[in-house]
Image (tube, helix red, strand yellow):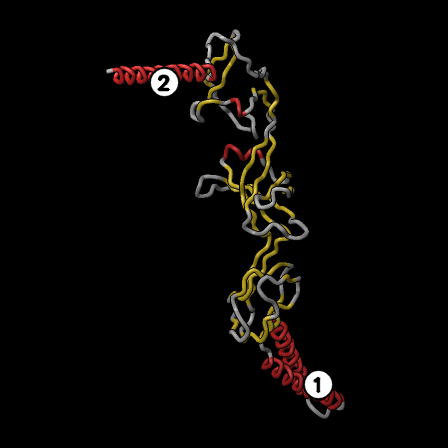
Amino acid sequence: MKKKIIYIVIGLALVAIVVIRLKTNKETTQNRVYQYDKETPISVQVDSLKLENVNAENSYTGSFEPNKETKISAEIQGKIGSLLVDLGSSVNVGQALIQLDNSLLKLQLQSVEVQIEGLEADVKRYTVLANAEAIQGVQLEKSHLALKSANVQKTTLLEQINKTTIKSPFNGIVTAKMTEEGAFAAPGMPLLQITDISKLKFTINLPEQKMNQFEVGQTNQLTVDAFPEIILKGEVSMIGSKANMGNSFPVQFLVGNTPDLKIKSGMSGSVLVANKNEQKQIIIPSSSIVGTNLKPQVYKVKQGKATLSDIAISKRIGNKL
């Protein structure tokens, strides 16, 4: 019986110790947790709003195109004897690009030259005889006509031989090669493509309401997406007179490339246009916005209290709006 009473007392003592420990832990935890008091004021950072001048820039995207680009073809038919440039080669105006086989034309030229030499001798001989009235003048006249005809043939052959050397029409870069040595060239068949990117065309497409921002001869700043550090100047060279498929109008700028020709055909960029109508608007930091993009809100202080208010955002400018 005594042992049973002792066990009960020990059990009650252990329960009492656990209860005391739990109560002590609860008090310690409550002391560590911050108890927010809605009636206690807190300090916040506020900003006084005022109207500020906004002279923003509009930006329109577009793409760069070469100022000159052409496909080179032969004016006469013939076998390609040698291809003097390769893809990516820089070429100058008048530089030989392709040499066609002209051996047969040169043989024909030699034959005509021999014929001219004989006709010139005949003219001299007939002139002496005609002056001595030893022959009729008609023979001398026929020799003169034959000599003129032979000279025309010679000029024609020289022109044909000259056209067997295909030359570059302007400075540029070989951007396509559609033939190889030994192939046959015919008039109208493209052989090479030459592209001049020392000057570029930059084209944007605008709705009709925006066209009044540009006029021919106007100069604007252009940026290149691939090289944001490069600022170019473009002059408006053309404003479209007919809408395209998207019901917008093309506006084209003429732009000088960098000395090392960094800007390539097909790159994208933007043209900046200053907003001539200076406006006053309220500007706030983007970090002050709460809520969502569909329903932006800010806290406004009224009579010492911060209340949530709906706002409308007209434009974002960097980290402000």
Numbered tag placed on residue 51 in the rendering: none
In the rendered image, which quarter contains the C terminus?
top right
Amino acid tagged 2: Val
Count residues near mark 2 (Cα–Cα under 10 Å), then give few for <14, some for 14-19, many for 20+.
few
- Residue at 52% over, 22% down: 288
**Horizontally, is 18 left or right of 5 in the view?**
right
Residue 169 in the image: x percent, y percent? Answer: 62, 62
Amino acid tagged 1: Glu
Residue placed under numbered mark 2 in the picture = 18
Sequence-first disc among 1 and 2: 2
Quarter-of-image position of residue 85: bottom right
Numbered tag placed on residue 120 in the rendering: 1
Residue 294 in the image: x percent, y percent? Answer: 42, 25
- Residue at 29% over, 16% down: 6
Residue 160 in the image: x percent, y percent? Answer: 60, 74
Q: Secondary structure at mark 1?
A: helix
Q: Nearest the camera: 273 or 50?
A: 50
- Residue at 53% over, 33% down: 210
Residue 208 position (above or below residue 93): above
State if disc 2 and disc 1 touch (CB < 8 Å).
no
Q: Nearest the camera: 238 or 95?
A: 95
Residue sitting at the far bottom: 134
